[in-house]
Each structure stands twice: as C-alpha cells, then as structure tokens.
Image (tube, rainbow, N blue to C red):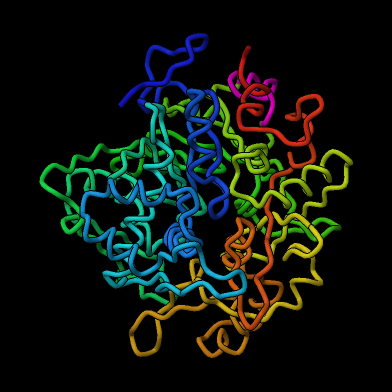
C-alpha cells in the first residue's frame, strides 16, 4: 500500500495507514460517488470513496446500457475467476445498449440465502467499481456501505478487497461485526454476519454466510482494509473502539446537516414547524471524549470550506469528510441536467431541502431536495405506483412459520400489512431505491413510464457557488479540492 501524505500537515503516527488525507470524499447515494469521482479525488492525494450501495444493480444496468467507454469490460478482464466474469457478461450485456424505453432486465433481490447468481454479481460489481477507481495510480480508495443493508455486505466487502480497497466506511447503524469480518476475509476464510430480524426471540440468531473460496485463485492476495465507522456521537465511537474486538480503526463523525440518512435525534422525536426533526445539545458530539480514544477521525456535515477544515483540526480531527460539494461536481454520477438545475438553484438562493422524518423505509431521517418532477416534489411522489422491485431497504422479519420474510414500508400498503406491518408505518414512505438509481440515469421503465429521480443533499447545497471559478457554469472535483486544501 502506498501512503499518500500531505507534507504540510504530516503526522508521525497514523494508525489507519491511509497516509494523512485531509479530505475524505463522501460515499454518496447509488453510484453518485462512482469510480470517476473517487479516482479524481485519490489522484489529488485525498481519500476517494465509491458508494457500495446497490452496486449489483448498477453493474447489471451499466452492462445493459452497452458498457459505454468499455471500462467495465477492462475491469472484468482482471477479475481472478474468468468464468464468473463471463457468466455475468453474457447474462446482462447488450451491444449498443438497450432501447431507451425498454425496461432493464431484473436481477435477484437481496436476500438472506442469496443464490450463486446474485453472489457472483455482487462480488464482481464491487470488484469492478474499486478496480476502476484505483486504475492507473497509487492513491488510496475507500468504499462506503450501509449497515442498514446487511444481506449483500459479505460479498460486497470481498469483491472490493479483491480489487485492493484501502478503507471501508460504514454507518446507518452500528457496524460492530465488520472489523472481524475484514480479518476473516483477508485470510481467505469463510465469514458470517449477524443479521437484524424483527420479531426474533432473545435467544435466536440469524446470520448470512460467505465463503471466498470459489472467487479465489492460487495467486490471489488480499490486504485487510482499514475500517472507518460513521457515527454521530462519542458514545457510539466508544462502543466501536473499546467494546468490539477488533475495534474500528477510525471514525467519521457526521452531524445532522449532512445529506442522505441522518441519525435520529437523541431522546423523544420532536419536529419543528416545517415538520423536520429537531436536534439539540444532546446531539452535539463530545469531541473531548472522541479525542481520548486516540484514533483518527474526520468531521462531516457542512464542513466544505478551508476554514471548516482548520476548525475540525482545532477540535482534534485529522480532517473532514465532504459529500455535497462532490455530489454536484462534473465527475459525480448524478445526471448532468440535474446537477445543472441544482447548481443554478444554489447560485440564485432557491434550493429547498427538507429533512424528512418519514420518507425512508429505514425510519431514519432522510434529506430530500425538492425539485420539480422528482420524488422530492410531493405531487410527483403521490402519483407513483407503490412497488418494491429492488428491495435493498426491506426489513427482515420472523414469520409465524419460523421463516424469515421481507417487507418494505414503501411497498403496496396491503402487502405490507399482510406481512404484519402497521398501516401507519407506510404513511409518507417513498421508494428510495428506485429514486436514487434514477438520479444517476438508470431509471426503470414500466408500461411506458420511467421512475423519477430522488435527489438528496446536505445543508451545504445552498453554497455550491463557492466552488465555481469565474466564467464557469460547472465545477470539477479538483475545483472542490482547491477550495478545501491549504495552498
């Protein structure tokens, strides 16, 4: 592993062995933080991060769009087991791409006991994304996963490790078992991950298992990536540092102004006059306690300036994680027309951002950017037929017959209630999975209608103009880093 060190701020000891990045680029959405963005950031000596969310669907749909640029074919040619790459290619690739109004071919939904077809697709998808982000340079690349999406985690981690991923970032829950899993996979050993299932008795355990052997060759070599847990409080950082064995290697301390899913406020939920969760003093991280852990950390949530970088360092952080600024740069996976619309709204002071306590089926608050024609527009959201055909945010629950079932609060209400869910819990829910996939140009079509985008951002979406250079109408990842980094 090659260390990437900024000489002006180099520290003698850095446990994470990622060099000393001042900036970690957020692993956003579904393919928003795709390989071109992560690669651009890594080339500048900072930590570029790919989003690992729904990469199996992303790979399958990119292949059906014809593998524009031939990048996937190149990455798949480097996969250790040629037969696996060939099976996935044959199943999904469409020369020249599918017709614009044709639906994407479906793929298996995430599930506890995944088929070999789904496991192979998941391993390969994560390998491809990380391989392309690391191609042609020696900078560090990370992958971001969500604890809330557990069933694909093991093959996702392994695929990323096959491509040499340097760091794993994980939040949206308490990822207490991930450090152990990384140890096991790095040694080529089978691993299992305990899965959250509603309705389990206290003595019951449900787990998913993964054996790396079918995906390895005799000359395969795996490095154990470092684990950075995304947390919102000192107490959770303490748990992941001291009460897990092994513990986390470092932390991203994320505040409620960051985009995507936010941690719920501590205590009883209260809403402001706009209907957004109210955060108070209890939600402010105790940085003195985090410093006492002796582990590196970065602060996230409206830290997208050089001044905020210095403020973070004064608190004891190594640097900052920045998401929103990169989400709307040229290398982002968001459709160019959406990026342009959001940037124009930001410049003119017309961005509307809502921290929705109901939108996400996870129950976590989720930031939604209100754009006409997207799911962030309530009128558009109301017209969508409820359907759950990607299934990443489904809740696993124990059925009366003792088998694990799957339900989503954004699926058809009658289906959710039939599975034991509360009708009240379906109110205000939206299909985040399909909305995020549509945001990056891979919307599913059904009966002549395409899924609409769902755009999320942090509070800093109101300040995107700071990254524009004179005379320009868009900005690059380099432009963001020029604003953030010491000159």
Q: Is residue 482 above or below residue 121?
A: above
Q: For the view shown, which residue lies furthest in the top direction?
A: 8
Closer to us: 425 or 300 = 300
Residue 253 on the magenta segment: no
Q: For the view shown, which residue lies furthest in the front direction?
A: 96
Residue at 50%, 37% (x, y): give it: 38
| The residue stretch that appears in magenta | 304-314
Horizontal and vertical percent for residue 231? 52, 43
Any part of residue 241 in sight: no
Q: Main secondary structure of the magenta part?
A: helix
Q: Is residue 21 above or below residue 348?
A: above
Horizontal and vertical percent for residue 117? 30, 70
116 relative position to 371: left or right = left
Q: Is residue 285 above or below residue 20?
A: below
Residue at 63%, 83% (x, y): give it: 447
Residue at 38%, 64% (x, y): give it: 151
Any part of residue 110 in sight: yes
User: Which quarter shows the C terminus?
Assistant: top right
Horizontal and vertical percent for residue 356? 72, 60
Closer to us: 84 or 204 = 84
102 relative position to 179: left or right = right
Q: For the view shown, which residue lies furthest in the left direction?
A: 218
């Amino acid at each position: 592993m090659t260390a990437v060190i900024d000489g002006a701020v180099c520290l003698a000891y850095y446990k994470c062995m990622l060099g000393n990045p001042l900036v970690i680029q957020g692993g956003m959405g579904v393919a928003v933080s795709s390989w071109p963005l992560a690669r651009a950031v890594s080339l500048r000596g900072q930590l570029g991060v790919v989003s690992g969310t729904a990469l199996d669907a992303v790979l399958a749909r990119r292949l059906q769009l014809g593998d524009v640029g031939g990048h996937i074919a190149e990455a798949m040619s480097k996969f250790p087991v040629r037969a696996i790459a060939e099976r996935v290619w044959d199943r999904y690739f469409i020369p020249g791409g599918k017709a614009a109004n044709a639906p994407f071919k479906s793929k298996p939904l995430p599930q506890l006991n995944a088929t070999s077809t789904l496991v192979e697709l998941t391993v390969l998808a994560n390998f491809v994304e990380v391989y392309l982000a690391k191609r042609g340079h020696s900078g560090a690349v990370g992958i971001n996963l969500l604890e809330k999406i557990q069933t694909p985690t093991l093959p996702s981690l392994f695929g990323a490790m096959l491509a040499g991923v340097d760091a794993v970032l994980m939040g949206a829950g308490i990822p207490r078992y991930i450090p152990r899993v990384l140890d096991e996979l790095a040694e080529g050993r089978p691993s299992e991950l305990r899965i959250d299932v509603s309705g389990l008795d206290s003595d019951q355990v449900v787990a998913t298992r993964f054996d790396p052997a079918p995906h390895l060759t005799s000359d395969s070599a795996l490095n154990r990536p470092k684990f950075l847990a995304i947390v919102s409080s000192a107490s959770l950082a303490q748990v992941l540092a001291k009460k897990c064995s092994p513990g986390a290697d470092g932390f991203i301390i994320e505040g409620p102004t960051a985009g995507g899913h936010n941690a719920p406020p501590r205590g009883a939920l209260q809403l402001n006059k706009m209907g957004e969760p109210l955060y108070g003093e209890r939600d402010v991280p105790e940085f003195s306690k985090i410093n006492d852990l002796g582990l590196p950390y970065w602060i996230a949530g409206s830290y997208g300036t050089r001044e905020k970088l210095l403020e973070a360092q004064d608190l004891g952080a190594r640097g900052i994680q920045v998401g929103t600024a990169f989400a709307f740069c040229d290398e982002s996976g968001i459709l160019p027309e959406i990026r342009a619309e959001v940037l124009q709204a930001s410049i003119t002071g017309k961005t509307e951002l809502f921290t929705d306590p109901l939108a996400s089926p996870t129950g976590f608050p989720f930031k939604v950017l209100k754009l006409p024609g997207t799911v962030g527009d309530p009128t558009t959201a109301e017209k969508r037929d409820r359907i759950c055909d990607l299934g990443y945010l489904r809740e696993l629950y124990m059925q009366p017959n003792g088998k694990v079932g799957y339900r989503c609060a954004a699926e058809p209400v009658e289906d959710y209630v039939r599975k034991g869910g509360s009708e009240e819990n379906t109110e205000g829910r939206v299909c985040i999975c399909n909305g995020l996939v549509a945001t990056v140009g891979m919307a599913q079509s059904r009966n002549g209608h395409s899924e609409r985008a769902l755009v999320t951002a942090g509070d800093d979406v109101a300040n995107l103009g700071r990254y524009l250079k004179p005379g320009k109408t868009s900005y690059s990842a380099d432009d963001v880093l020029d604003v953030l980094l010491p000159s």
